[in-house]
Image (cartoon, rainbow, N blue to C red):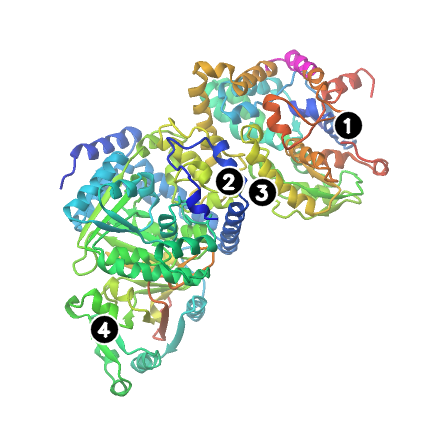
Amino acid sequence: MNHAASERVCLDPRFASPFPQAALPMLRNPQLRKNVGHAIDVIQAKRGKLVAEKTDWQELRSAASAIRTHALENLGAYLEQFEARCTAAGGHVHWAADAAEARQIILDLLHQENATEVIKIKTMTSAEIQLNPFLQAAGVSVFETDLAEIILQLGEGEPSHIVVPALHINRSQVREIFARTMGLKDLSDDPKELTNAARTYLRQKFLTVPTAISGANFLIAETGTVAVVESEGNGRMCLTLPRTMISLVGIEKVLPRFQDLEIMLQLLARSATGERMNPYTSLWSGVTPGDGPQKFHVVLLDNGRSSILAKAKERQTLKCIRCAACMNICPVYRQTGGHAYGSVYPGPIGAILTPQLMQMKHAQSLPYASSLCGACYEVCPVKINIPEVLLELRSQVVNQERRQAGRFFDLMYLGLRIANLIFATAWGFHAAQRMGRIGLRFFTRKDGWIHALPSLGAKWTQTRDLRGLPKQTFHQWWATRAKGGK
Amino acid sequence: MKQPVTARQLTLDRIRAATPSAAKDASQLAEAYAALPRAYIRRGALSAQARIELMIQRLREYDAEVVECAPAELANTITTQLATSGRHLFVAPPGTPNEWLVTSAWKITGLEWTIDHGLAIDEHEIEKAEGVVTAATCGIADSGTIVLHHSAIEGRRVLTLLPDYYLCILRASQVVETLPEYFSRCQQPPVLATYISGPSATADIEMTRIKGVHGPRILVVIVVRDEVENIN
Amino acid sequence: MRASLFITCYNDTLFPETGRAVVRLLERLGVTLDFHPKQTCCGQMHANTGFRGEAFSQAKRFVRLYQDAETVVIPSSSCVAMIRDQYSGLFDELGNESLRKEFAALVPRVYELSEFLIDRLGVEDVGATFTHRVVYHASCHGVRALQLGERPYKLMAKVRGLDLATLPNVDRCCGFGGTFSIKNAEVSSAMLAAKLQDVLSTKAEYCTALDNSCLMHLGGAMHRQYAGMKTIHLAQILASTEADSQSEATL
C-alpha cells in the first residue's frame, strides 16, 4: 500500500486538524510508527556516541546559544551588514515581508531569466511559503534534487521531518514510487539501486537547467557569505552548475562572523545526522567570476519572524539551527511522526515555531502537543528552552480562548476554574474531596477501582483504570493521629 | 531590480521595534561580540604524528584510499595512483605544478590531461573527465575534513564535483586537529570554500547509508610528509 | 531537625499511604514533622495548562503558608520543579517585590524527598527492607528539572533485599504530562504502551518512582491489563522494614 500517496496530509497550519485529531490516523499506522521509530533510533544512537566523545559539548552549546542570542539582539545591524557585503561581492539582496511577497519576488526573478524550469536544493523555508505549487501554477517546472524531496515530490507526499523529510517512508514504498514515475519496472527495493535511479534521473537536470533555488543554513554578516550544509552533493550541483542562483533565507539565520561556523558546524552535524561533519559544506560570497552562478540573489524572509523577535521569552525560538535533534528525542514525535503537527516544522520546534509564525491565530493545539518532559531542551544545541516557550504559548492560547463566549462552558475551562476555587481554601479543598469521593463511589467497582468514567474522565479510563478514592485522606489521617489515634 | 523598497524598510523597522536596545550598525558590536563566552576546545592536544595518523584514520573510515609519500616522491606517487586507477582522462586546475603533470611514465600508460586553463572548458568537458587531481588548503583531522578554498591549485568548484574519481594532494603541514584551528589559520575568510568530509551520502531511505549519490565516489588522498610545523 | 510536609493535592486525595510512609520514614530518622492544615495545591496543573493567573494565586498561597517553615519536604518531584522553575516567573509577572523576596528566601528550603534524605539528612541507608524485584521509573521532572541524578539509586542500593532491575530507555517520558493525559489522551496512551513494554520486560514485581503522577498512569494501565505488576511510591519502599517484608506492601 502506498502510504505516501494515500495519506492526504495537510501541512498548512491554517487548515490542518488540531494535533489530537491529526495524530489519530498516525497512531493507528503500524508501518509509520515502525519507520519513524527505526529512523530516530538510528540517528539517536549515532548522535549519542559522538556527543559522549565531544568533551566540550556543553561549552559548545553555551557558546552557540550566546552567539545566536547576540545575533538576534542585534539582528537589524547584522542583516544590514550582510546585505552590504553580499552586494559588494556581486550578489543582490531582496527583502520579503511575508510569504506572498517572497513567492512573487522569486517568480519575478525567474521571469527575468525566462526560466521555465528550476532545480531546487531542499529548503524547508520554501515549503513554509508553499513555493512549489505557486511556481507550478505559474508555469515553472520545479525539480527537487534532494533524494527525500524527490521521493516526496514524485510520490505526492509531504515532509514529516526537517532533516530526513521522508523518514516515514520505507524502501518498498520508495520502490513503488520510483518504478511508477520513472518507468523502471524492474527496480528492486535495495536502497543502493534506488539511490542510483535518483542519481541517473538527476544528472541531466543538473547539467542543463540554468536556474536553481536553495535555502541556507547560515548567513555570515561580516563577509556576506551564504553557507549550505548537506550530505548528498545535490546542493553542490545546484550551487555551481546553473547560471542563476536564488537563495531563500529566513532573517534569523544570520551569524556575525565567519569564525562562528567553528562552533555551529561542530554542533549541527552531530545533532542532525550523528556525524562529526556532514559530507559537504559549501560557502560562497556573492559572485565569483568563472566559478558558479554569475547571477546570485538572496531573498530575506520575515513572514512573522520579527514579531517573534519582539517577545522576550519567545525570541529564543529564532535561535534554531534546524538540526531536528529535538524531534529525534521527542517521545511524542516518536509515536505520531511529523504529519500530525500539521506544519512543515513538526516536533518540539514546530510546536513553538508554527503557532508563532501564524501570529497565534492558528495551530493553537500545538503548544499542548507535549508532555513537557524536557528532553528537547537537553539536546538542543543552541539551548532553546522549548518547555518554557510551550508554557508561555499555552498561557497565550488560554488568554485568547477564555474571552470567547463559548469557552465558559467548555469542560476543561470550567473544570480548571472550579479547581482553582477549590484550591483557594482548605475548607473548599476538603469539601471537594468529600464530594469527589461520594460522587466517584458510583463508578468504583468491587475491586476498589474505577474502570469507566463519563465525559472528560472517559479520556482517562479509555486506556487506564483509576483506583477509587481512599476513605481517609492524608490530612484526615494526620488530624486523627494528632488527636492520639494512629 | 523590481524590488519594493517598502519591504526592506518595513522589515528593518519591525526588527528595530523588536530590539530597541540594539546597536545601530555592526561596527559598534565588536566589544559585545568579543565578550561572548568561548570555553570550548580551540586547540588540539595531539602530537603532529598523532594528528596525521588521526587524519588518515578518519579518511579511511570514509572509505578513502590514503597513501603517504615524501615530498620528493610526490610526482611519482601521483602518476602511480592515476595509472592504477583504471582511468585515463583527467582534469586539473590551472595552477597545478608542471612537475605533477608530465613524467615519462605517462606516455606509456596513456594518461591524458585537460588543464582548466583560463577556465575555458565547459561542464560537458569536465563531465567527460574520469578523474580530477587538486591540492587542498587544509585537512581537519578530528572530522577527516578536506578544505578547499578553490585557489588556482585547487580549482573551481565544479572540477571536484563532476568527475567520479578525485585525487587530493594534502601536505602534512596543512593538517590541523580541530575545526577551530582551521578557522584561526584563515588570515581572512575565504570567498569560496567547500568542506569535504567523506563521499556524498544519503540516509534518506530507511536510514541506510548509501555513499556516492552526487559527487566523486572514489576519493584518494596523498598525504605528503613535508616538514610538520609544531603549531601547539 | 524539623520539617514541614507538603503532601501535594493529589497525594492527599489519592495516595494517602505515600504520605503515611513519608511520615513513618522521616520520624524513624529522627525528623520532627509538622503538617500545615491549610495546604492545598502548588498550582502546577494550572500553570502547565496555561492558566497563569490561577496558578499565581495558588503559588502566592503556598509561599505565604510556608514562609516560616525551617524546611519543606515534598514527595513529588514535579511539584518541586513547579516551585523552583515557575514560581519566580509568575511572581515577576503578577507579584510584587515583597512576595518575590519571600519566595527567594523560601525556595532554598524546599526539598524533594530524595533530596531531603541525601542532601539535608546526609543519609543513604534509611534502615529499609523490601525483598522484591523492583524497577525504578525515573520521572522527567526528577531527571531533568531537579537533576536528582544518583540520589534515588543510592537510596535503593541500601534497601535490604531489593533487587533493582535495569529499565531500558529509562529517561524516556511515560506520557502522563498532567492534563496532557486528557487533552492528548491517545498520544499519551501510545507513549504509555511503549513505556509499559519496557517496564514489563524487566519482570519486576513492583514499579516504583518518586512521583505518584507517573505511577497513577503506569499503574492504571497495569491494572487494566492484568499485567501482574504493581506500582508503589519509593517512600513506601524506604519506609518498609523487616517486619513489613513479610506482608504484601500496600498500594
* Total marks in image: 4
Q: Is disc 4 in the same subunit as disc 2?
A: no
Q: Nearer the viewer, mark 4 or mark 2?
A: 2
Q: Secondary structure at mark 3?
A: loop
What residue is pinned by disc 4?
B96
Q: Secondary structure at mark 4?
A: loop
- Give the extent of the magenta segment: A424-435
Q: Residue B198, image x and y in percent?
A: 39, 63
- Closer to the chain start, of discs 2 and 1, is 2
- Residue B206 visible? The answer is no
- Tag 2: amino acid: Met
What residue is pinned by disc 1?
A447
Q: Nearer the viewer, mark 4 or mark 3?
A: 3
Q: Is disc 3 in the same subunit as disc 2?
A: no
Please check the rendered image and state whether residue A428 is part of the magenta-colored stretch, yes or no: yes
- Residue at mark 4: chain: B
What residue is pinned by disc 2?
A26
What residue is pinned by disc 3?
C172
- Tag 1: amino acid: Asp
Q: Is disc 4 in the same subunit as disc 3?
A: no
- Residue at mark 2: chain: A
What is the distance, in whole Å, between disc 4 and disc 2 at their CAs?
A: 57 Å
Please check the rendered image and state whether residue A427 is part of the magenta-colored stretch, yes or no: yes
Decide: few, some or many residues near mark 2? Use Cα within 10 Å; few <14, some 14-19, many ≥20: many
Q: Quadrant of residue B171?
A: bottom left
